[in-house]
Image (cartoon, grey):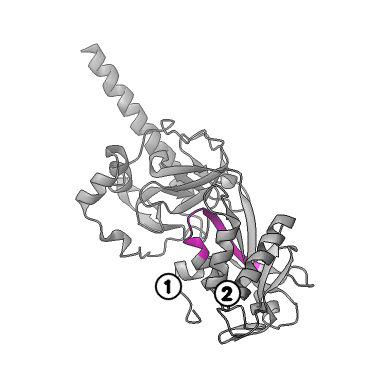
């Protein structure tokens, strides 16, 4: 009998801890305008799985948390104290959710982050369960429950994404290499490279100009000399630089001078920015191979130049096609 009472009161204590933790944060959340909860629409293709299919894909604990909106016990998750460098992905669909660079120690028993991996990687909806108002965090791709959002995080966002460890998959950062290509509008070029196995991350931006800290509006004047480029981080054990070059040649027309399809201007030029003598040599070799193949009747005008300072483009440009449910630009 005594053992039963001990188990009962231990369980009750843990539940009270969870309710108190969420309850305290909730009062503050109601006062914060920045934690608004817009209605979200999740990719219908990703949500087409039946309940039975989710049960087969996920472990019992993952299913209870991610599909039934459960909560793992505090301090029980494998990633609560993880200090490794890498990317935290959705355990259900593999979507990139958070970077280790934004993880911090909150002391409340669950992994905490002050910013998502990219705009749209997670979404928020209002949660009025348990008799209180909370802000639920779900995967921006498959809609699985991840945790909740509170306004008590560190600067610069002041937000705390409180996430269940069981809803995460940690992709440890390995030694990566980088490459940068310009082949017209960076929306479509980025989308093509993101599909390539071994490409860990892509960022669109500007390179090769004389103007510091350019904006998209500056680039569009065609007076800064910058090119729209895709900066790539890749795992050389899974994809080679030569393979990246092969994709680069296929995703645009390298014979069009300072333009790509209907997009005209120096910012749309064909260019390879190299980071080492080896990359330079491989780029020139690849260019000559393409010229010798006589695939194009006109001269290839692709520039091969040393990498300069990279300026990240505005957030709305990042993964543009993916955010809008598109497969490619019309120019392609």
Residue at 53 percent of width and 53 percent of height: 239
Q: Nearer the viewer, residue 3 or 259?
A: 259
Name the residue tied to disc 2.
293
Instruction: State the image coordinates of residue 28 (x, y, percent, origin top left).
Output: 49, 49
Instruction: Tell me: residue 194, above or below residue 225.
Output: above
Using a 10 Å C-alpha cutoff, classify the residue at mark 2 as few (fewer than 14 neighbours), some (14 to 19) or many (20 or more). Answer: few
Distance CA(mark 2)–CA(mark 1): 32 Å
Q: Which mark is residue 212?
A: none
Residue 233 falls in which quadrant of the image?
bottom right
Residue at 33 percent of width and 23 percent of height: 10
Instruction: State the image coordinates of residue 53 (x, y, percent, origin top left).
Output: 23, 50
Report if residue 142 is visible in the image.
yes
Instruction: Tell me: residue 17, above or below residue 148.
Output: above
**SS label for mark 2:** helix
**SS label for mark 1:** loop
* 2 vs 1, front mark: 2
Using a 10 Å C-alpha cutoff, classify the residue at mark 1 as few (fewer than 14 neighbours), some (14 to 19) or many (20 or more). Answer: few
Residue 78 falls in which quadrant of the image?
top left
Instruction: Tell me: residue 55, above or below residue 272.
Output: above
Q: Which residues are magenta?
A: 193-205
Name the residue tied to disc 1.
326
Instruction: State the image coordinates of residue 205 (x, y, percent, origin top left).
Output: 64, 67
Residue 272 forms part of the magenta stretch: no
Residue at 51 percent of width and 60 percent of height: 33
Name of the residue lying farthest toward the top: 2
Instruction: State the image coordinates of residue 257 (x, y, percent, origin top left).
Output: 66, 83
């Amino acid at each position: 009998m005594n053992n039963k009472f001990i188990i009962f009161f231990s369980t009750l204590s843990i539940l009270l801890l969870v309710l108190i933790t969420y309850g305290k944060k909730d009062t503050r959340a109601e006062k914060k305008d920045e934690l608004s909860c817009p209605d979200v629409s999740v990719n219908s293709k990703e949500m087409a799985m039946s309940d039975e299919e989710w049960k087969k894909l996920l472990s019992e604990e993952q299913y209870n948390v991610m599909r039934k909106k459960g909560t793992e016990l505090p301090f029980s998750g494998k990633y609560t104290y993880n200090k490794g460098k890498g990317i935290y992905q959705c355990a259900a669909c593999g979507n990139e959710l958070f970077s280790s660079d934004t993880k911090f120690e909150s002391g409340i028993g669950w992994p905490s982050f002050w910013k998502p991996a990219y705009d749209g990687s997670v979404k928020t909806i209002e949660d009025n369960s348990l008799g209180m108002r909370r802000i639920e965090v779900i995967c921006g791709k498959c809609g699985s429950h991840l945790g909740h959002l509170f306004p008590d995080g560190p600067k610069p966002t002041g937000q705390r994404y409180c996430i269940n460890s069981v809803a995460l998959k940690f992709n440890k950062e390995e030694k990566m290499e980088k490459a940068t290509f310009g082949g017209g509008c960076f929306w479509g070029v980025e989308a093509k490279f993101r599909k390539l196995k071994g490409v860990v991350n892509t960022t669109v931006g500007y390179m090769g100009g004389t103007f510091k800290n350019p904006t998209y509006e500056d680039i569009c004047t065609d007076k800064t000399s910058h090119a729209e480029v895709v900066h790539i981080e890749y795992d050389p054990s899974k994809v080679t630089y030569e393979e990246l070059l092969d994709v680069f040649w296929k995703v645009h027309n390298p014979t069009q001078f300072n333009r790509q399809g209907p997009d005209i201007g120096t910012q749309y030029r064909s260019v390879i920015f190299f980071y080492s003598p080896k990359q330079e040599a491989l780029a020139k070799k690849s260019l000559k191979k393409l010229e010798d193949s006589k695939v194009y009747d006109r001269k290839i005008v692709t520039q091969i130049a040393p990498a300069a300072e990279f300026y990240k483009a505005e957030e709305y440009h990042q993964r543009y096609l993916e955010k809008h449910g598109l497969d490619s630009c019309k120019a392609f």
